[in-house]
Every structure is written in C-alpha cells, then in structure tokens.
Image: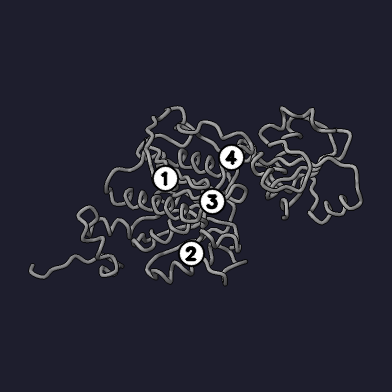
Amino acid sequence: MTGWKPVLLGMNTNRYNRQIILPEIGVEGQQKLLNAHVLVIGAGGLGCPILQYLVAAGVGNIGIVDADVVSISNLQRQILYTVSDVGKQKVVVAKAHLLAQNPEANIDIYPVMLHSSNVLDIFQNYDFVIDGSDNFATRYLVNDACVILKKAFVSGSIFKFEGQISVFNYQNGPTYRCLYPEPPTVGSVPNCSEIGVIGTLAGIIGTMQAAEAIKIITDAGEVLSGKLLLFDMLTMRSQIIKFKAIESNKEIEELIDYQEFCGDFPVETIQNIDSETLQMWINEQRDFQLIDVRNPHEFERDNIGGENIPLDDLLENIAQLDLQKLIIFCCQTGLRSAKALELLAKNDIKGHFYHLAGGIVF
C-alpha cells in the first residue's frame, strides 16, 4: 500500500521519529517502549535523568518510589527540580514535571520508604526495576526482592567523581550478591552528603542506566549483565569488569532486616544532642570527651575540636575512650556518629554515649 505508515497505538509518532527511524528500534521497539512498565527507585541524582530520558523515549508506564522532599542541596545535581519545589514531596513534583515533558506517559508514585513489608507488592506490577538509591540496605533489598520475583534490575551508584553501573538478575544472569556478597564495613563508604559528589556524574550514570533500560525493553545491543562498568569522570576513562553468577545467590526465598544486615541503624533510637546544647556544654566547661568519627582528611580539613577516631577503627581503639566520662560522637551529618553508638551497643560496650544530631555546623 503506497504511502502506508505504521501507527503506534496511543502514541504520537512524530514525537519519537528520531528513534523510530533507527533500525535497532523501529516501530516494533517503540511499541515495546509504550507497553513497558518500569519502576524507578529514588527520584534523586540518578533518578532524575533516568526518569527524564525514559519519559522522553516514550516508556508508557513508570512508577517512582521516594519518600523524601526536595531540599536546596538537591538542586546541584537533581535537575528535575527548581527552587520553587523546595520542601515539596519529590515524587509529586517529579510526576508533574515529567507529565509536562510528555503528557502521554502514565506515572504512578509511591511516597514511601521501601522496606521488606511493601517491596514485593510494589515490584510485582512492573517488568523490571531501576535502582537509583544511595544506600546499601536498599540495594540489597532491591536485589533480593527482584530475585524472589524473578525480575531484572539496573543498578547505578556514584562516589565523588566515580560511578558504577550494571544489570543484575537479567535472563538468569548474576545478581547483586554475586558481585557484592556482603555489605561494606559500617562507615567505610560515606554517602554523598558526607563525602561529596560532582553533579554531572549523577547525570552521566543516570543516563547510562536509562540507556540500559531502553536496551532491555527493545532488545537492542548488549545488556550489561555479568559486567560492571566503572567510570572515572576526572580522567574520562571507563572499564568493564566481568563477573560470574553464583547459583546459590538465586535461591533467596524470603526477605530479611536489611538495616541490620548493612549496619544501617535508625538514628531516632539513640541518645542525641543538638549543636546548641553542645555549645552550651562547651561554654559551661562541662567535663566530656568529644570524638570525631570522620576520616582523618575530613577532620584535618575542618573540625570543632576533640579527638579523631574514624568509625571504621572505633572498636580497635576502645582504649582511647574515657568510659568514666560522658562521650559525645560527632561527624559531618550525624549519620556516622549515630552508627558509632549502635556499634558500641551491639558490642556490649557500656558508657554514657551521645551523638551530635544533624552533624557539625561550621
């Protein structure tokens, strides 16, 4: 039939013409994008470019999980948001901006913390998952839920100027636990709020994650299954490390307490003081010991006094603690100092311990 053009059901072909004319995508691939159901964990530094490029590409059904609100410090890398969005729920703002970008998308939002009691219910309605979370407890939770439900997931992470990306549990391929059997030692890998990250790196790695998702949906190219891509932004060098599946890691049948597994303890369960109280105690010349649990280079850069014992070395240096005194632990944001108290409690070390909630204010 002369002049006949295939029609994508529910889609404006003009919008996607530049990718439809690619032989690797075509009308069939675009229809697969329209029919796909993809869940994105985290609407932060990685999640923003992931969501923007999936919506732009015409992925028809997207879910977003994030319980956080937009803060001013997010804007350096989370380019989906603006100053007027500060204080608003990320998933609500993200949905509004994404629909303005492409009104044809169907977007469901989950303004909740992901945990063992809700993850299977949320995951079950999606073809696969993209993990843009920033903590190990969520990464292991996502992996185990995907193994149980037999779903693939695209994983990305960033640290300062370096990023990683891989696809796990894809077509019976390796899982996250095949590459990382155990979480790192508590406090040994600071998060972005503690150690910093360059905003453009989040855009690069998040865009790569979106690219892997499009490849999975359209069957175009080689998926990063059994391969870990490492990227260094300072040198613009990348390398791929191959790893194999360990069959026992595919036999997960139930979920666990991932905060306990990763040493990611809830801050609200421990004793804390705020910066105003600490300053008052200093002014009153109270007799206490101040322990800064950041890494040495952080302590040398700026500190509020006290002694430096990195969190990772705390148990090996208990002798430096004056257990007869009140001891206050501090760090940049309050996360590592809170973990210090939990670490001491788990090892049955008794004392009058506090942590500086909210971290050091310079």
| Sequence order check, earlier mark of 4 and 2 | 2
Q: Circle 4 is placed at which residue position?
A: 189
Q: Circle 2 is placed at which residue position?
A: 80
- Labels 3 & 2 near each other (Cβ < 8 A): no
Name which quarter of the figure residue 56 lies in. bottom left
| Sequence order check, earlier mark of 3 and 2 | 2
Vertical arrangement, residue 197 with respect to residue 58, above or below = above
Q: Circle 3 is placed at which residue position?
A: 197
Where is residue 178 drawn, in percent x and y? Answer: 45, 31
Q: How was the colour assigned to the protein in this rendering?
A: one colour
Instruction: Give the residue at x 54% y 63%.
Output: 75
Res. 113 in view: yes
Q: Circle 1 is placed at which residue position?
A: 235
- Labels 3 & 1 near each other (Cβ < 8 A): no
Label 2 secondary element: loop
| Residue nearest the observer in this picture, 237 or 319 | 237
- Labels 1 & 4 near each other (Cβ < 8 A): no
Disc number lying in front (3 or 2): 3
Where is residue 246 drawn, in percent x and y? Answer: 43, 28
Where is residue 327 drawn, in percent x and y? Answer: 83, 40
| Sequence order check, earlier mark of 3 and 4 | 4
Instruction: Give the residue at x 27% y 46%.
Output: 221
Give the amino acid type for the residue marked by disc 3 in the picture: Val
Disc number lying in front (1 or 2): 1
For the image, the number of numbered tags is: 4
| Residue 304 appears left or right of 185 | right
